[in-house]
Every structure is written in C-alpha cells, then in structure tokens.
Amino acid sequence: MTMNPRDVEHIALLARIALTDAERAKMGQDLSAVLDYVRTLDGLGLEDEVPLSHVHDQFAPPRPDDPHPEACLPRAEVLAQAPEADGAYFLVPPVVDTR
C-alpha cells in the first residue's frame, strides 16, 4: 500500500517535524512498508490465540518498598548544593510554555 502524500504530511504535522520533499517521499515509503507488514500480521489468523501477558508462567513479585533513612542525605545538605532552592524545594526553570 502506498501512503497518500497528504497523510504523510498530516503525520509529520502531528509529530511536529518538518520534512523536505526527499524526506517526505522516503517517509511515505517507510510508512507504507510498516503498514504492509501490519497487514501481513493481520492475515495470520490468530483470533483464537490467547494473548500473553508474560512469556513464562513464573512471575517475580516486586520486592517490598522498605525505606532506608540511613541511606538518605539530610535535606539541608542536598539543598545547599542546589543551584537554586526555596525552602524545602529545588527551583528549576519552567519546561512548559503556557502561551
């Protein structure tokens, strides 16, 4: 299946990437190959197979989450090494533009 150039452009817009004409053509070919592979998998007839949650029947339960206060540095010592701190917190530059 050949990807429609309009669909490729839409996917690039959703991914927020700019594509040159050559990249757009290559991306169309790559996406077409992925869709062809998925179509191949669809034809395997696995409707009656039970999905796996684990490859093995054995399951390792998570270890208990026991606190170890002796392994922690004092808060004041950690905050003293921070470039900027405010009371009990690190101050960091904003990472989300709210405009």
Image: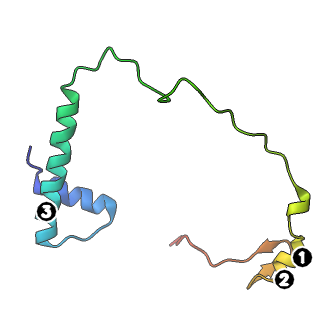
Q: Is the C-beta separation of discs 2 and 3 under 8 Å?
A: no
* Horizontal and vertical percent position of residue 12: 25, 61
Above/below status of 33 relative to 86:
above
Are discs 1 and 2 less than 8 Å apart at CB?
A: yes
Q: Is residue 83 left or right of residue 40?
A: right
Residue 58 appears left or right of 10 = right
Q: Secondary structure at mark 1?
A: helix
Residue 74, quarter of the rendered image: bottom right
Tag 1: amino acid: Ala
Relative vertical location of residue 77 with respect to residue 47 in this rendering, above or below: below
**What residue is pinned by disc 2?**
80
**Mark positioned earlier in the residue sequence (2 or 3):** 3
Which of pointers 3 and 1 lies earlier in the amino acid sequence? 3
Q: Say what secondary structure mark 3 lies in.
A: helix
In the rendered image, which quarter is residue 25 located in? bottom left
Q: Secondary structure at mark 2?
A: helix
Total labels: the figure holds 3
> Disc 2 marks which amino acid?
Ala
> Percent position (x, y) of residue 95?
56, 72
Kindly identify the residue that appears in the image at 79 percent across and 83 percent down.
81
Distance (Cα) linking label 2 and label 3: 52 Å
Foreground pick, 35 / 71: 71
Give the residue number, with chain letter if any, for mark 3.
26
Taking the spot 41% from the left edge, 23% from the top edge, the residue there is: 51
Horizontal side of 2 relative to 37 (left or right) equals: left
Q: Look at mark 1 in the image and give the residue it sits on.
A: 76
Between 79 and 6, the one nearer to me in the picture: 79
